[in-house]
Image (spheres, coloured by chain):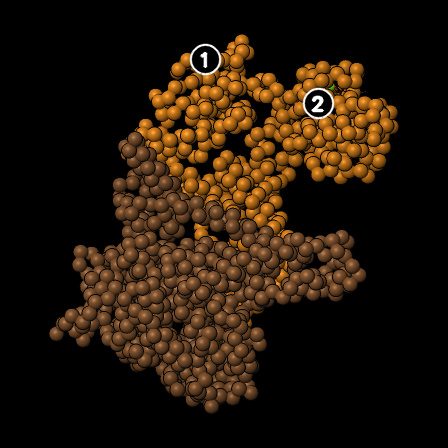
Chain colours: A orange, B brown
Amino acid sequence: MEDTITALATPPGEGGIAVIRLSGPESLQIAGRIFVNGKKERMVQFRDRYFNYGYILDHNKNLVDEVLLVYMKAPRTYTKEEVVEIHCHGGMIPVRKILDLLLKEGARLAQPGEFTKRAFLNGRIDLAQAEGVMDLISSKTEHAARASLQQMEGFLSKEIKAIRDDMLDVLARIEVTIDYPEEDIESLVEHEIRKRLCAARDKCKNLLESAHQGRLIREGIKTVIIGKPNVGKSSLLNALVRENRAIVTDIPGTTRDVIEEYVNIKGILVRILDTAGIRETRDLVEKIGVEKSREMTQDADLILFILDASQPLGKEDMEILQLLKDKQVLILLNKSDQPHVIDEEDIRSLTDSTILKTSMVDGTGLDQVENFIYNMVYSGRVEQKNPVMITNNRHKEALIRAERHLGEALEAMDASMPLDMVTIDIRNVWEALGEITGESLTENLIDRIFMEFCLGK
Amino acid sequence: MEFQAGKYDIIVTGAGHAGCEAALAAARMGMNTLVVALNLDAVALMACNPAIGGTSKGHLVREVDALGGEMGINIDKSFIQIRMLNTGKGPAVHSLRAQADKKKYQAEMKFTLENQKNLTLCQGEVEEIRTSGGRVCGVKLATGEVYSCRSVIVASGVYLKSRIIIGEYSVDSGPNGLFPANRLSENLKDLGFRLQRFKTGTPARVNKKSLDFSKMIIQPGDPRVYPFSFLNKPIEREQVPCWLTYTNERTHQIIRENLHRSPMYSGVIEGIGARYCPSIEDKVVRFHEKMSHQIFIEPEGLHTNEMYVQGMSSSLPVDVQIAAYRTIPGMEQVEIMRPAYAIEYDCIDSTQLKLSLESRNIEGLFLAGQINGSSGYEEAAAQGIIAGINAVQYIRQEEPLILDRSDAYIGVLIDDLVTKGTPEPYRMMTSRAEYRLLLRQDNADMRLTEKGYRIGLVEEERYQKLCTKQETIQRELEKLRNAVIPPSEWVNEYLEDKGSSPLKSGIQLYDLLKRPEISFSDIIKLGETTEQIQPEIQVQLEIHAKYDGYIQKQLKQVEQFKKMEKLKIPRDLDYSNITGLKTESMQKLQKMQPENIGQASRISGVSPADISVLMVYLEKRRREKRSNEA
Ligand SMILES: Nc1nc2c(ncn2[C@@H]2O[C@H](COP(=O)(O)OP(=O)(O)OP(=O)(O)O)[C@@H](O)[C@H]2O)c(=O)[nH]1
Ligand SMILES: [Mg+2]
């Protein structure tokens, strides 16, 4: 039995409407689990080839998007399988969310050209028609890869190529002493290898960071506001959104659920989440507060941690600071219009994060918050004017793997593994980075060995 | 005049390193086998260096031995020096290398052939391979004998239309003044083979009495001798040293001044030489910044004063050779007994073979060794044994033995030759093997002996030895895992002495062995219960404990690799029917007829996109077939 696949069927970008397609035996069941009709009721029956108006809801019954859903019964479909199409709004955010939900419900992300491949395999289109498909598949693997490499304005590809070249050189130098132990070839000393592996790893890290920045530009910065009750979280959200989106009162615990809003800050899409305050209950104070913060900030790109400067620091404030140590955090000393109790220096000793004084009453520091967000995206080395989704993801995945293999190589060296073992990891690095160009290692390596060294009888 | 001279199952042409293994394998598997060699004095001739093994080549010898071949046993009988190379590196790249007594090596091999049941050895020149209906049916010798047979293995080495070149002088000749085989080339062309011309060379042999060893550095053998063959126990033998010396600026100057007299540079030689086997003139030209090159002086045997001058291969005229050799420390008075020469010869385009080493065009015709574009004795022997086995399988109408890249260096070698072809004489290297850590020389028996046993080449004794070895390893591993050593003053003192951290609580011996600074001999000293274990078992236990992480990594890679190898492509698939393939790829695939998707993906020029197209096509075909059957 075939599995059910899904993918965005329209070109990715900021078009008005996007179509997400599902194909496979489970298509309708999967889509049916996240779709409700105009009256927000679940549907049991879908008519064949009929537009259904309704909404997509996430697992917490939150509205994701307003959509049209079409069910097409097998076999009179493009793939000859059960097909569902969801027409939603064209931005990357709804599309991604809906795809995520479908994947969670059991669909699998289709490979490039897979719908057409199924159409072909199921006899829906003949070989002549399939020619177009094959072009598509080839374009994904070869030309597209090369073309988008060029589109990356040469930066990423050049960097990757440089790392690969260096790894190839390290490999050749290790390999030559293995295959020609009796030749008088100067072997690479361990600390030199280590140095080059570290440098390569740093480069991968930097590149990943830039990929991350590219994503931030496209998909928005997930920003979570946290802090104790009544410190001014909702006030901050309202100030950034420039309208009264969240209810503000002086009663601690006003905000119950998470409120989510999108704002445009200096041309950058920011997705802000206002949360319920982290409350002190009598016993389990720290535990609950800290746990909750951990959960909420898990995949945040930026955390705005608000403290009420007119109140003393709580114990769990310190705990949370500790917890957020490795994250991108901006600390706001709010209510700066009031007499200070917290000394900025006290906090500075606990964290490396930027600290700003703000007041939601007189607007102090709001500009600085906006500048901080802008700089976070644009301070990096890259400004990707034309990022291509697929290539980007591929690069990213390859880089993540390369970085991991580099880490493994360094670990192995620390554990005094022989160098010929470490080459296994270095080969992996080279191959991970080379998947885009499809070059074969062995031949390159052999060529390099003979180019550089004088060997033989 | 032709005459019917007899009938055999299998005929092997050539009795070099490939031919000997092929013939022995065939005869041992019960086939009536005839070996026709140009000159019976040249059986198993080591035409170039007097050594067997070395990095990756040592692996090949072990693999041939594990399958039931002869090379390992034969070098064990005839070595005069032996060394394990790369012992400072990981176990995957340890390699055995032996200096052979060339004459003894030849005599022992010839005698083994002569005494082998089912095997006939005769001198002659095969000039024609006869076929009927696209299938091999016999051979004809230049002297008129016609033998009928069911399969032929061509292992003609470098003798096809070979030509020797020394400076301005050249002559049609095989190595060492032996006759060339001029007729078989034409016949192979008629049979549809594409021929190419390769070139190799050998340095001069010099008289030991004319050398001053006091100016050279001695290179002795290892004090402890591991044999090549898994059948042999450690061997006690007195060893003969090699000597190391260096070229210098004067040597290089003489060569540079005489380059115009070198046939390589004047264009007389058309054959393609190997990058790893450059002549001294190549080295001087290509690596002009290098002030000196290493020269190893190696003995050719116990009963000769001829010495091989490794590093001084050349095709320069003899007067230049003499002048250049005499600039080298210790060689000031050198007396050249046989000058260095270059040799050109015909070989086939190896992509015309199947992975079984059978020709794609003619059933029952197998080719092995340098005729396939490889170089080296070990590479030849490895192909020889596989060709021998598969000729037998062909006659038995059984599946051929195909080792893949994760099974053996032999698999890497044959896959490279058959799938990629080779633009220069092909030499094995450990860096060609992707799964090197699994393909060690110490476990060749555990990888291959069972396979050899199942097809009937490995005899009972060898197989039982393997079984015992494997059981012992399992048992001892168990013991190491169960034995816990508690911390004690004595133990911790011992560990600290070894630069290892002391124990805080009890630890399994197995985990202790994982520490890089702890060897098995330490375990024996620390774990009082561990009784004396054979060294070859110790090696296995140590590798198991120390490198398991990496072994697991490689096993995962192999799993990925095997997935693609398992996707078989039907025989005689018509690729011109497949829409979507690039024209160039379509032509290549059509010509190569890869046996599986993995092999198809390794053909140069075939892109991942072509592979997707091919996979889609095969899947569709499979479904159609299934629905037709239903
Ligand atoms: N003086 C002063 N008051 C402020 C400032 N920011 C917020 N407040 C007041 O503090 C009170 C709480 O503000 P909220 O924004 O509701 O605080 P919150 O953190 O969202 O509170 P919960 O949702 O209850 O956790 C309100 O009365 C605000 O007007 C500030 O900068 N200065
Ligand atoms: Mg609030």
Q: Closest to the observer: A354 or B138? A: B138
Q: Is mark 2 within 8 Å of ligand 1?
A: yes
**Is residue B432 left or right of A94 when viewed as pictured?**
left
Q: Residue furthest top?
A: A39
Quadrant containing ligand 2: top right
> Taking A370 as reference, is B49 left or right?
left
Q: Quadrant of residue A358?
A: top right
Residue for badge 1: A45
Nearer-N-terminus badge (1/2): 1
Question: Residue A102 location in percent, x, y?
Answer: 51, 25
What SS does tag 1 mark? loop
Horizontal and vertical percent position of residue B393: 31, 57
User: Which chain does the numbered disc 1 sit on?
Assistant: A
Residue furthest left as drawn: B1
The numbered mark at residue A275 is: 2
Q: Are marks 1 and 2 on the same chain?
A: yes
